[in-house]
Image (tube, rainbow, N blue to C red):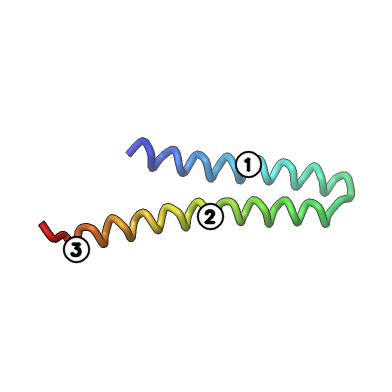
Amino acid sequence: MLEDASILFQIAGIGIIVAMIHSILKQMGKEEIAQVVTLTGFIIVLFIVLHRLAELFSQIKSVFLYQG
């Protein structure tokens, strides 16, 4: 249970950091770099979610294909 909450906090932390960097870069007039930072943050979160989904499907597979 604690591990599940830590994943949510990691994703929220990444979102907050990316939002802060995006707003700072946008105020400096570097909209292109701000968009790249936002896209990079999205890709990082996407990889985290895909990794967790792969673990979930692995656990479901082991439950239904138990050969004991």
Q: Amino acid at mark 1?
A: Ile
- Residue position marked by numbered label 3 in the rendering: 64
Q: Amino acid at mark 3?
A: Phe
Q: Position of residue 40 (x, y in %)?
A: 67, 53
Q: Is residue 8 above or below residue 61?
A: above
Q: Hey, which quadrant is residue 32 in on the image?
A: bottom right
Decide if residue 9 is on the left or right side of residue 36: left
Decide if residue 38 is on the left or right side of residue 27: left
Q: Choose mark 2 or mark 1, whichever is in front.
A: 2
Q: Position of residue 53 (x, y in %)?
A: 40, 57
Q: Position of residue 21 (x, y in %)?
A: 74, 42
Q: Residue at x 55, y 43 (%)?
A: 12
Label 3 sits on a secondary structure element that is helix
Residue farthest front in this picture: 68
Please state the total of marks drawn on the protein image. 3
- Residue position marked by numbered label 1 in the rendering: 16
- Residue position marked by numbered label 2 in the rendering: 47
Q: Earlier in the sequence, mark 2 or mark 1?
A: 1
